[in-house]
Amino acid sequence: MGAPFQDGGPITLTAGTRKRLSSSSIRFDWLIITALAANTGAIYVGSSLIATGRGKTMLPGDEWPVPISEGEQVDISEVWGDTDTTNDKVAWIGGWGRPPRV
């Protein structure tokens, strides 16, 4: 049996250009997205409609446990990112079952 989680990143973003956080369709019970501490600007995370200044704003070093309703899942390939500053990075970890304590 494999680990009850999977991770991805760091994913390099380009200012003003939305990017999927994964090209693979993987459904998770829980998902935590992290803006790397070395970033110099804000990143934005959301649906395919994401754009600079829209979505969940994350500053360098922020972690965001994505809210997922009980019994629901989120597909990481449907989560997108954008940034104010080219070459800022985002990473994620997602899993099944009970989420870790953050």
Image (cartoon, rainbow, N blue to C red):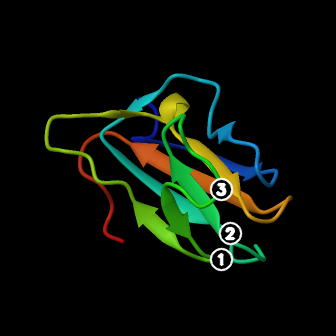
**Residue drawn at the location 65% of the way across and 56% of the way down:** 52
- Residue 66 vertical placement versus 84 (above, below): above
Say which residue label 2 marks. Answer: 36
* Relative side of 38 to 59, left or right: right
Tell me how far mark 3 sits from mark 2, CA to CA: 17 Å
In the rendered structure, which amino acid carries the disc numbered 2?
Answer: Leu
Dot in front, 1 or 2: 1
Residue 61 appears at what percent x and percent y? Answer: 61, 77
Q: Secondary structure at mark 2?
A: loop
Find the residue positioned furthest to the left.
70
The residue indicated by pointer 3 is: 52
Residue farthest toward the right in the current orientation of the protein = 87
Name the image quarter holding residue 66. Answer: bottom left
* Amino acid type of the residue that numbered disc 3 sits on in the rendered structure: Thr
- Give percent across and percent down for residue 67: 29, 53
Q: CA distance from mark 1 to mark 3?
A: 15 Å
Judged from the image, the secondary structure of the residue bearing numbered disc 1 is: loop
Contact check, label 1 and label 2, Cβ < 8 Å: yes
Label 3 element class: loop
From the image, which quarter does the C terminus lie in?
bottom left
Identity of the amino acid at label 1? Pro
First reached walking from the N terminus: tag 1 or tag 3: 3
Check the picture and name the quadrant holding the N terminus.
top left
Q: Residue at x 82, y 51 (%)?
A: 14
